[in-house]
Image (cartoon, helix red, strand yellow):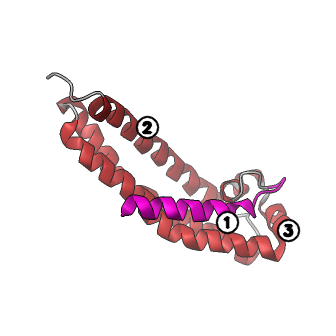
Amino acid sequence: MLLTLTIGTSLALGVIDIGLKNTITPRGIVSFEFCGFTASCEAALMEWRDKGQALAMLSLGLDYLYMVLYPGLICVALLMIAPRVAKNTYGITMFAAWLAPAMTLADSIENYALIQVILNGSGDTFGVLAGIFASIKFVILAFTLSWLLFTTLRYVTFGRPQM
């Protein structure tokens, strides 16, 4: 069920994101997440106009559901794999599993900041805040997904190692 909801929400966010891509935000909402670092928040809002800003708000609203789903899925997957990993990687696996929900906190602060950028039309403070928390989110995501991939390939695909 969690996987189905995550995939469905990912697809919906992807469809919305198509309307957010342009020369200022070539990666859609992801470009906007970092607009405070490039001083392009105002330019993105001007390029999007009312329709794009409404799409961005829809994306950010739906992301409040997504930010619970994808870290939850990663956490559950790592917890399911943990009993199969070697003793020397068990601690890292559990750390990664319980770190995954931290993405929800980082993502929620990022979303709040991006909503403020849209509402205020300026990215001076909130754009930078969004970029900082988007960076934290993506670092955690990269680590937890990499560890999930490693443990899946090592301990599920190729079997449990000899102790």
Above or below 57: residue 155: above
Magenta stretch: give its range.
Answer: 1-24
Callout 3 touching callout 2 (CB < 8 Å): no
x and y, in percent, of residue 87 in the image: 17, 32
Residue that numbered label 3 is attached to = 46
Name the kind of residue labelled 1 in the image: Ile
Quadrant showing the C terminus: top left
**Is residue 128 a member of the stretch shown in magenta?**
no
Secondary structure beneath label 1: helix
Q: Sequence order check: which comes first, mark 3 or mark 2?
A: 3
Q: Sequence order check: which comes first, mark 2 or mark 1?
A: 1
Quadrant showing the N terminus: bottom left
Residue that numbered label 1 is attached to = 16
Residue that numbered label 2 is attached to = 146
Q: CA distance from mark 3 to mark 2?
A: 37 Å
The image quarter containing residue 59 is bottom right
Q: Residue at x 66, y 55 (%)?
A: 30
Nearer to us: label 1 or label 3: 1
x and y, in percent, of residue 77 in the image: 32, 49
Closest to the observer, 146 or 102: 146
In-image side of 117 versus 110 (left or right): right
